[in-house]
Image (tube, grey):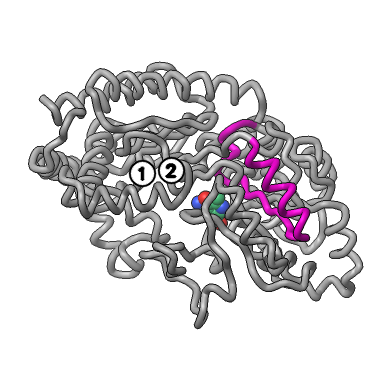
Amino acid sequence: MATISLERVKELLGQENERFVRERPRSRALFEEAKKNLVGGVPMSWMRIWSGGFPVFVEKAQGVYITDVDGHRYLDLCLGDTGGLCGHAHPKIVEAITDQMVNRGTTTMLPTQDCIWVGKELERRFGLPFWQVLMTATDANRMALKIARSFTGRQLILAFNGTYHGSVDETLVVNFFGELINVPGMLGPIVPDATKMTRVIDFNDVDALEQALAPGDIACVITEPVMTNIGIIAPEKGYHEALRDITKKYGTLLLIDETHSMCAGPRGVTGQMGLTPDIFVAGKFIAGGYPAAILGFTSELSDWLGQRLPWHNFFGFGGTLSGNATAVAGIRAALEHVINEENYDRMTRLAQRMEEGLARIIKDNDLAWYVARIGCRVEFRFLPKPPKNGSEALFAEVDYNEVDIVTEGLTGPLDALIHVWCANRGILLTPVHEMALVGPTATREDVDHYVDTIGALVRELLG
Ligand code: PMP
């Protein structure tokens, strides 16, 4: 296997950081100005995690390109970490949202006709018959867990190690060598004993699942159908069938969160694999990046909710209405015009090309890395093979950082280098991991530019 020297990584990182700062005086000045009133110099904390010392400030974002205030144009492979997966400022979505806002109103505490079309379409795609439209997937997950607890009369939630479902307290815990702790770096749940709230096991482990649910005290299993947030971890053959059978056997509800995995296709992994959850959540790009989330239920849950009059017992269901009419219009436009087979065929073909290009670089240079893909989402990681579950993914990283050589924190500087190297060559790659999303208007040339850029960096590193 090829060895990358930490010294070389740090040397290149220094050069690239220096270039990044030199070529972006306007963004840098705005960042300094922003620091005076915005926490960390940004309106939302996620924007603080870009390499280079500060985020570039956006002049405009259109399709899969972003132009910054210094005049640099980037291919956007981050796409708002999925929120922008329909492409920025998609004309059809903008038209529908603008029409709603300008001519019909944003929030009225009343339904609009679009919700009829949206409800039917969501049933057609995902199988569940009853729906609510909320504003964020975090909120939808929070509400879903509340409902599950109330419905089952049980307190505990089961989550998989290394998962992320938004800032949902129940899932901001990690099983660290047998001890349940707050996810490092997150403002974790403030409860005296997290084991009273969440049980955490590993994905793809049927025996552990059976054991965890057997006491009959778990209200709900919350999971992505394919894990994404600890790196892509695919379900093993038969895992979803076992998950459904075992949850049913012990009276536990199954919540599938497709917020990220809808990059697999217009019906998500749920539609593709014919999964039958009790509760379904998706968000982010479901209205083309306008705040919106969908929360689906079985008839049984919907009936139960409907009987719980007065309905205002459920206040807090996705905040208090703001932007709901616009969200419904945006969801309709996104589903009708963008989140469709035709676009996904194209995006997936291009993502396959990207995957093959990266795999070739890894093979030709004998790197101990792997590349993984779901639909139009492609990532490579500094591990020799894909982990089977979150613990493997987490602890492999820990080993790598703490024990291995190449080590002494190579992952950190190497990750930073890849991102700033890409930014200096007109590509924005999703921060923190090497994850690229191929949007609807991306081209072959865009994909090749990214693959060539990574290839050139690897040559510099090994050369
Ligand atoms: N679920 C999953 C699987 C996610 O990855 C995220 C955010 N990355 C969320 C939910 C939260 O989404 P939102 O920003 O809409 O709250």
Label 1 near ligand 1 (CB < 8 Å) = no
Identify the disc placed on residue 119: none
Q: Quadrant of the C terminus?
A: top left
Q: In the rendered image, is residue 283 in sight?
A: no
Tell me where the magenta segment starts and ends, as one range.
238-265
Residue 138's spot in the image, x, y percent? 58, 59
Residue 377, magenta (yes or no): no
Residue on which the image places disc 1: 433
Residue type pointed to by label 1: His
Instruction: Name the residue located 31 percent from the left edge and 49 percent from the top edge.
Output: 397
In this view, the residue farthest toward the bottom is: 192
Answer whether labels 2 and 1 touch (C-beta < 8 Å).
yes
Instruction: Name the residue located 48 percent from the left edge and 33 percent from the top edge.
Output: 377
Residue 234's spot in the image, x, y percent? 53, 37
Residue 251, magenta (yes or no): yes
Whichever of callouts 2 and 1 sits on the residue coming sooner in the sequence is 2
Residue type pointed to by label 2: Gly
Q: In the rendered image, is residue 50 in sight?
A: yes
Q: Secondary structure at mark 1?
A: loop
Q: Is residue 318 left or right of residue 63?
A: right
Q: Label 1: few (<14), some or many (≥20) within 10 Å?
A: some
Q: Quadrant of the N terminus?
A: top left
Residue on which the image places disc 2: 231
Residue 218: quadrant of the picture: bottom right
Label 2 near ligand 1 (CB < 8 Å) = no
Q: Is residue 84 left or right of residue 37?
A: right
Instruction: Name the residue located 29 percent from the left edge and 31 percent from the top edge.
Output: 426
